[in-house]
Image (tube, coloured by chain):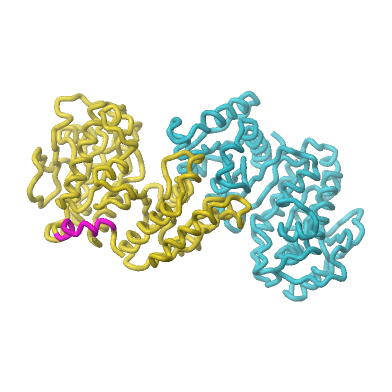
Chain colours: A cyan, B yellow
Amino acid sequence: MRPDHIAASKYICYTKKMKKLIAVTMGDAAGVGPELCLRLLAHKPLHRLATPLIIGDGGLLARVAKLLHIPFNAPCFTKEPESLPKPAVFDPAEALAGIEIKPGIDQPACGRAAAQYIKVAARGCLAGRFAAMVTAPISKNALNLGGTHFPGHTEMLARLAGVRDYAMLMYSERIACAFVTSHQSMQSVPRSLTPRRVAGVAALAWRNIGALRGKTPRLCLLGLNPHAGEAGLFGSEERSILAPALRILARRGIRLDGPLPPDTAFTPAALRRYDCYIAMYHDQGCIPFKMLSFDCGVNVTLGLPFIRTSPDHGTAFDIAWHGRVSPGSFFAAFKLAARLASVA
Amino acid sequence: MRPDHIAASKYICYTKKMKKLIAVTMGDAAGVGPELCLRLLAHKPLHRLATPLIIGDGGLLARVAKLLHIPFNAPCFTKEPESLPKPAVFDPAEALAGIEIKPGIDQPACGRAAAQYIKVAARGCLAGRFAAMVTAPISKNALNLGGTHFPGHTEMLARLAGVRDYAMLMYSERIACAFVTSHQSMQSVPRSLTPRRVAGVAALAWRNIGALRGKTPRLCLLGLNPHAGEAGLFGSEERSILAPALRILARRGIRLDGPLPPDTAFTPAALRRYDCYIAMYHDQGCIPFKMLSFDCGVNVTLGLPFIRTSPDHGTAFDIAWHGRVSPGSFFAAFKLAARLASVA
């Protein structure tokens, strides 16, 4: 039971020799990303877990820091530093230099820069220079305006890493959910489920949650239909898709409970029992997750050859550069990245 | 803003003259229904709210009472009593007399008797002799074996009352959800949604929750798709069905918030804001409901010309006649029926 990035063991040897370095992408400059990065640089207890290297714009960070009265004295590099004893900023191409950025609106320059930060962080992870990456929120619209056409981080990172089997995991200390489907219409969910996909997501969750917990995890496979189909009365996917998925997993030595009726799977007693849920669709997992972990949830991409975490909120354009963003979820994402890197 | 049963005003005049009498059907004799009825008869504080008349089998109740050491001294009638100053049992046709009933298994006699109890209670409600009815759980299989072919109470009562527009409401002090669809496959949900149906359920919830709360209620219409469709990216039902439903409601003077992204609609702040949610499918409402109100939830059928409540659990055959059932949800159903009858 080892997380996926173990497969790339050459990187691990490398990160074990040095103090863990975590790449933190600044995200969309017009969103809450710059403030979150500044708060991370200012919060010293977190630096004991790993050294953050912000991949972003030094000038813009200085501007936001001044506006919000956040201390900011980390060194800024325009070439990637060879070794890094303390937190710093790395501005790979000075993509925002000389451009007047306004907070709270989609701008092509912000999208272009955000895409570049992600590429630099992913390549550094793939090359083993970074132990993990944490991503501040991006705007899909700005990304498009800037010429990068992906629905979000996850799909872009999967392409950069050349993987096709990946899944979203929402993680907090109280609840964890891995998703078989996510950002798609409810109508399209049933036909997106296959035994292979369900088994693939469950296996990813099993390995990663097992590594985090340091023990064989107890996983719950949720039914798609109410009452898990009630013996076929309310839908057949539990028999035609989930039962074969459980057989595939059993052959690989992975045992899950389920398929369980979704509505009784999140009662307090059930929550204590399960280390992770395998959800069939977005809201099946996200409703209970956000009820229990609204400000401390972390999004983890499973299936990449490196560790990637992010907060579970978006750019929050309405409060960008206001000094009002809660850094709870972002700090939790950094902590979890450091923890995942340490169990690697 | 008055609950639906107000329409049948002749009954209301009648119930106002007498002490409120609530018919309580015993449900499936082989399930937890008999124990629940005995606990209700033994719990005197509840009788101050209304007088329960158990529609069930006196002999079987005496047998279970002896087995579980529950005091049982209520009078048993085989003809409906004309007036009733204190709790009693009414056994309309002695359907179980002379039959050896075993706990925990589906038996035709139990299904036949359960159907009869429901008919007697519903007719008494329609005739204005009962202020409300509370139903203990039935087994769909036993009902079928006994020759009554309905998926459950709700459909049977709707037929008996001759109504076609009805909806399930799950109610507790912490959260209330009305359902546009319920016991059907997820695959069939999108095509079951129509503007008329959504508006109908929202209007039923508006009237009934308004009567319960004694004020204009604040309702939340949930989206069907993740992020409420994210402007059409993840599904179109928010635009093609929910927006027209909101326009129908606005013309009737009913205003709702929404459609809201389902995953952020149940955070603690949102829960404080809303008196009731309009859920598009079973688990969208039942997951958060059962997380918050596992042992105190009440099921209310909206749209009937009388009041009907029930606990939110089933026959629990595995613990039938064991003395281990928690009566919380059943007591809450009786209390809510009494409260609904008092605001009528």
Judge left or right: residue B19 versus residue B108: left
> Is residue A332 or residue A314 the one in the foreground?
A314
Residue B310's spot in the image, x, y percent? 30, 46
Judge left or right: residue B315 versus residue A262: left
Q: Which quadrant would residue A210 be assigned to in this image?
A: top right
Task: Residue at 24% x, 33% y: name it.
Answer: B29
Task: Residue at 66% x, 34% y: name it.
Answer: A200
- Label the magenta part by its dominant secondary structure: helix
Q: Is residue B12 magenta?
A: yes
Residue B59's spot in the image, x, y percent? 15, 33
Residue A344's spot in the image, x, y percent? 75, 41
> Is residue A97 or residue A13 the one in the foreground?
A97
Q: Residue A291, can we see it?
A: no
Task: Residue at 57% x, 57% y: name it.
Answer: A294
Q: Does the magenta stretch include residue B178?
A: no
Quarter in which the C terminus of chain B is drawn: bottom left
Residue B55's spot in the image, x, y percent? 18, 41
> Is residue A51 or residue A244 the one in the foreground?
A244
Quarter in which the N terminus of chain B is drawn: bottom left
> Is residue A13 or residue B288 the one in the foreground?
B288
Q: Which quadrant would residue A141 be assigned to in this image?
A: bottom right
Rendered view: A339 above or below B18? above
Rendered view: A182 above or below A88? above
Query: Which range is magenta?
Result: B4-13
Rendered view: A258 above or below A291? above
Judge left or right: residue B267 versus residue A208: left
Judge left or right: residue B242 versus residue A105: left
Looking at the rendered structure, the number of numbered marks drawn on it comes to 0
Q: Residue B45, can we see it?
A: yes
